[in-house]
Image: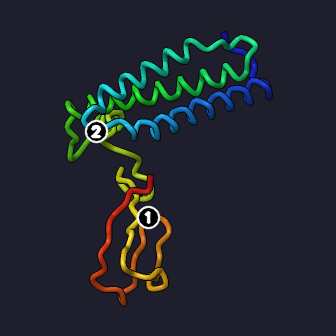
């Protein structure tokens, strides 16, 4: 059942993980093409098709087939997880003073993220300024947002997510 790790099987497993992750990331890109009003059905069909496609791949002695299978599987798993989060967000209310279990449940539902860098689950945002030459922007803070200097007043801007 359990075997001694070797350099080869650790490397193979890491490559499998990278391929699965790449499939998940690719699926998020492709899923942006699904119209918002058809998100549930579109992601469901997308997930189902990629899982069926993964099951159809010949992998025995075929590294390319194995890689394609893992890529498709990563895509299907990511969209299935996304569907689960959409459904859970409809039935779970975030608590103002959550317990550890509440935080975990809210995190599973996509209602709470890592509190890394004091962001408290929010995506870092960049402030995209318009009508201001880049040379007028000073005091740029790298970790979360652009902060214009005091000399720039009443600048129109739009917040954009980093992702």
Above/below status of 59 relative to 47: above
Disc 1 or 2, which lies upstream in sequence? 2
Q: Marks 1/2: CA distance?
A: 28 Å
Numbered mark located on residue 56 in the image: none
| Residue 100 in view | no
Residue 37 point in image, percent of width and height = 24, 35
65 left or right, relative to 131: right
The quarter holding residue 88 reads: top left
Q: Residue 29: percent from the left, percent from the top?
A: 46, 41
Q: Position of residue 127 (x, y in %)?
A: 38, 68
| Residue at x 33%, y 38% (from the top left corner) | 110
Name which quarter of the figure residue 149 lies in: bottom left
Frontmost residue, 123 versus 127: 127
Q: Residue at image x 46%, y 83%?
A: 138
User: In the rendered image, which residue does mark 2 sit on?
Assistant: 36
Residue 2 point in image, percent of width and height: 68, 14
Seen as rendered, the residue at the extreme bottom is 151
Q: Give the number of marks.
A: 2
Disc 1 versus disc 2: nearer the observer: 2
Q: Which residue is mark 1?
A: 144
Label 1: how many Cα within 10 Å (few below 14, some 14–19, many 20+): some
Of residue 28 and residue 106, the one placed in the foreground of this image is: 28
Tell me what residue is drawn at x 46 percent, y 25 percent: 77
Question: Is 126 drawn above or below residue 84 in the view shown?
Answer: below
Q: Secondary structure at mark 2?
A: helix
Q: Residues within 10 Å of mark 2 (few under 14, many from 20)?
A: few
Q: Give the camera-side residue of 125 and 62.
A: 62
Position of 93 with respect to 102 (left or right) is left
Q: Residue furthest right?
A: 7
Which residue is located at x 32 percent, y 67 percent?
158
């Amino acid at each position: 059942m359990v075997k001694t790790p070797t350099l080869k099987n650790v490397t193979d497993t890491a490559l499998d993980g990278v391929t699965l992750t790449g499939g998940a990331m690719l699926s998020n890109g492709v899923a942006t093409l699904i119209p918002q009003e058809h998100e549930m059905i579109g992601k469901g069909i997308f997930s189902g098709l990629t899982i069926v496609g993964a099951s159809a791949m010949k992998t025995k002695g075929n590294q390319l087939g194995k890689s394609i299978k893992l890529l498709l599987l990563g895509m299907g798993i990511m969209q299935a997880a996304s569907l689960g989060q959409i459904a859970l967000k409809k039935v779970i209310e975030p608590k103002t003073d959550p317990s550890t279990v509440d935080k975990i449940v809210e995190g599973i539902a996509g209602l709470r993220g890592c509190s890394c860098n004091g962001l408290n689950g929010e995506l870092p945002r960049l402030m995209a300024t318009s009508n201001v030459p880049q040379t007028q922007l000073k005091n740029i803070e790298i970790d979360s947002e652009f902060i214009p200097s005091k000399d720039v007043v009443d600048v129109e801007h739009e917040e954009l997510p980093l992702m």
